[in-house]
Image (spheres, rainbow, N blue to C red):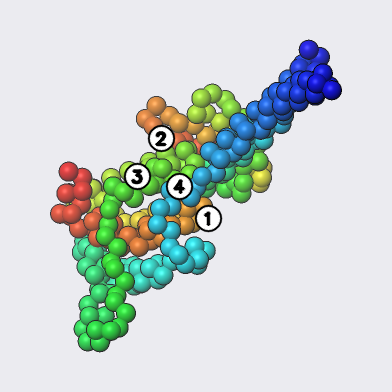
Amino acid sequence: MQHEAGIWVHHMNRRIAYAAVLMLPLLLGAGCARGKPDTSASEPEAAATDPRTPPPAAKPSVPATPRSTPAPARAPAPAPRAKDPAPPAASKGAPATAKPPAAAPTLDLTALKERLKDTKAIGIFSKITLKNQVDDLLDQFRAYHQGKAKLTMIDLRRSYELMMMKVLSLLQDEDQALASDIVSSREAIWGLLADPKKFAALQG
Amino acid sequence: MNRLTAALAQSVAVTAFLVVPSSAQNDEALKKDLTAVIALHGLPCGQVIDVAVLAESDYAASCKDGNRYRVYLNAEGRVIVEKQK
């Protein structure tokens, strides 16, 4: 009886050894799979709301396009417009119990840049291409502020909007949080680019 | 010994099954990336359906619409898209 038990234990040990050998690649594969699609890692404080819904901040920023305004070519007209939406809400004299206005997103260019670098929603070649195009756009702004460009502010605004569209179209499906943060910062970033002093500070 | 060999063979087979999809996923990611790059350059493509690696950071992309492009990183760090005939 004892001998049979010994044989049984011996068989069990071998089976366990085989099972361990078979399980090893599975465990390794699981580890690889866990490392792959971790897109949520770059979405820190994803809103509790449905991420598929379009970001509410996108709409207010759209009317600020200077296309409809017959602004002179050299006037950095759109920059102050970014501040327009805030005063009306405050001047209405809303009761204290009313819902407080949504906190204006503070622009953290460095953080946005880092998040764009880190996001897995955009491939490496696309990131390099975007960077090339952003650099070209910055060159155009620099030339404009130095009075060397033939472009008007309206042209620059159009190029800026196009660039935003490109970035957002790459992000919106897989990194919704970053896409909405960029949409929220759109006017603030434009303010930095359109204002010669702020732009110079940005470059320095 | 034979059992151990069989177990090892099974293990290798399972590993192969896991590695192939990973490579395929990388391939799909590259196709998606090149599709985006070509679109960012404003060139017609639709979707990259096949990629041939010419060198490091140098690819020949075939598009769904029949267009073919060479996509590469030049010495200045710019991504260049050249239409191939």
- The residue that appears at 50% across and 29% down in the rendered structure is B57
The answer to whether residue A173 is left or right of residue A9 is: left
Classify A9 as above or below A160.
above
> Mark 2: which amino acid?
Arg
Q: Earlier in the sequence, mark 4 or mark 3?
A: 4
How far apart are the alpha carbons under marks 4 and 1?
A: 15 Å
Q: Which mark is residue B78?
A: 2
The crowd level at tag 3 (other Cα within 10 Å; few <14, some 14-19, many 20+) is few
Q: Are marks 2 and 4 in contact (CB under 8 Å)?
A: no
The crowd level at tag 1 (other Cα within 10 Å; few <14, some 14-19, many 20+) is few
x, y (%) of residue B51?
62, 34
> Mark 1: which amino acid?
Asp
x, y (%) of residue A4?
84, 22
Give the label, 4 or 1, closer to the camera. 4
Mark 4 lies on residue: A41
> Mark 4: which amino acid?
Ala
Q: Kindly identify which chain the residue marked by label 4 belongs to.
A: A
Mark 1 lies on residue: A173
Label 3 secondary element: helix
The crowd level at tag 2 (other Cα within 10 Å; few <14, some 14-19, many 20+) is some
Q: Kindly identify which chain the residue marked by label 1 belongs to.
A: A
The answer to whether residue B73 is left or right of residue B15 is: left
Front-most of residues A5 and A94 = A5
> Mark 3: which amino acid?
Glu
Label 4 secondary element: helix
Label 2 secondary element: loop
- Report whether mark 4 lies on the same chain as mark 1: yes
